[in-house]
């Protein structure tokens, strides 16, 4: 699993607008925001994609979802609502090979996605 740009962000070698951080995870604003609020939540330990996760990652994946809830509260979209997306693989539109959740909010989001 080759490193991605997200590893450099985790090590603070390149800047990112960090919203939340703990021992296991990092949340930062997406460089190319698709909504007024667009934050990425990533595990510090690289898992290439959901397809590469295993049963032993279940606790970490659950933790990331609680971090998403914290981020929504920090950015005050917890009452208006938000969307959580994880792209997986080529057809899923994944462009960075380090598992991440997108949290989108701050406007009404359309469904279905493209
Ligand atoms: P994916 O397409 O893999 O689901 O999402 C990757 C996301 O990472 C994209 O929304 C893209 O804008 C974001 N991204 C890529 N490189 C960087 C970067 O260097 N900094 C930040 N903050 N976001 C990035």
Image (tube, rainbow, N blue to C red):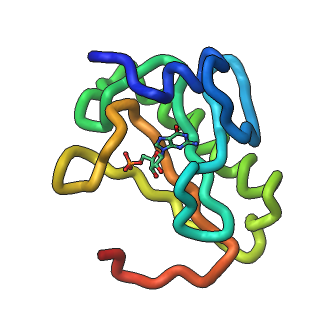
Q: Left or right: where does residue 37 sit relative to residue 49? A: right
Where the C terminus falls, by quadrant? bottom left
Residue 41 in percent (x, y) is at 57, 41
Depth check: 33 or 58 in front? 33
**Which quadrant would residue 9 be assigned to in this image?**
top right
Q: Is residue 80 left or right of residue 47?
A: right
- Percent across and percent down for residue 45 are 48, 17
Residue 57: quarter of image: top left
Whether 98 is drawn above or below 66: the answer is: above
Above or below, 45 against 66 in this view is above
The residue shown at (24%, 55%) is 92
Left or right: 21 as drawn, with respect to 5:
right
Residue 111, image x and y in percent?
40, 82
Q: At 42% across and 20% down in the image, what residue appears?
A: 46
Counting labels gives 0
Q: Is residue 58 above or below residue 95?
A: above
């Amino acid at each position: 699993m080759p490193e991605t740009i997200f590893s450099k962000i985790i090590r603070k070698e390149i800047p990112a607008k960090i919203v939340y951080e703990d021992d296991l995870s990092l949340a930062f604003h997406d460089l190319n925001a698709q909504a007024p609020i667009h934050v990425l939540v990533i595990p510090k330990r690289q898992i290439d994609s959901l397809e590469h996760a295993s049963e032993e990652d279940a606790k970490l994946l659950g933790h990331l979802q609680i971090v998403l809830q914290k981020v929504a509260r920090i950015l005050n979209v917890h009452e208006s609502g938000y969307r959580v997306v994880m792209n997986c693989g080529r057809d899923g539109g994944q462009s960075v090979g380090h598992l991440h959740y997108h949290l989108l909010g701050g406007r009404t989001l359309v469904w279905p996605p493209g």
